[in-house]
Image (cartoon, rainbow, N blue to C red):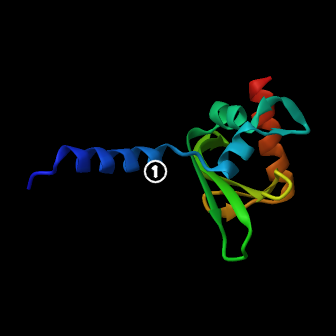
Amino acid sequence: MRLKLPALLTISSFLFVGCSSTDSRLSLVQNGVMNFCPQATVKKMVNNYVQSPKWEAFVATDGEDYVNIEGKITYYEQPVDMLLQFKVDTNSDSFEVNAFEINEIPQNIFMQNALLQNMCDEVS
C-alpha cells in the first residue's frame, strides 16, 4: 500500500502534536514546590530520588484530578515499587499529596512525610 506524501505528512503531524503536548496537571505538579522544600520543584525531588519515574495525570471515578508518580525507591536497603499520588485542584492551580504506597500497600501520613522529607534532603 502506498500513501501519498500529503496524507503521510498529515498523519505524522497529528502523531507529533498528540504525543508532544504536556498535560497541564502534570506541569502544575512537576513545576510546583512544596512549602517545606521551597528550593526544589517536585520534579527535581522525584528525579533525584525515584528510579525511572513514570508520571500520569487522570480523572478518577470520583471526578477529581490526580497525578500519579510510579517508580522504584530503596526501603530498608531493598528496592521496592512506590506510588506517590497528588490530588490536583485545577480551579485554584494547587495540589496536595493524596497517597503513598510501597509495593501496593498504602502507607500512613508518617511514612508519607518521611518520604517527602527524604526527597527534599536529597536535593539540598
Quick check: 65 left or right of 52? right
- The percent coordinates of residue 86 (x first, y second) are 75, 55
Which residue extends farthest top?
124
**Residue shown at 8% from the left, 56% from the top:** 1
Q: Position of residue 17 (x, y in %)?
A: 46, 46
Of 79 and 70, nearer the camera is 70
Name which quarter of the figure residue 100 lies in. bottom right
Q: Which of the image's four quarters has the C terminus?
A: top right
| Residue identifier under label 1 | 18
Single out the residue that lies furthest toward the bottom. Answer: 61
Q: Nearer the viewer, residue 9 or 21?
A: 9
Mark 1 residue type: Gly
Image x and y of residue 114, in percent: 82, 44
The foreground one among 89 and 115 is 89
**Residue 65 falls in image quadrant:** bottom right
Horizontal side, residue 87 vs residue 101: left or right = right
> How packed is label 1: few (under 14 Cα within 10 Å), some, or many (20 or more)?
few
- At 38% across and 49% down in the image, what residue appears? 15
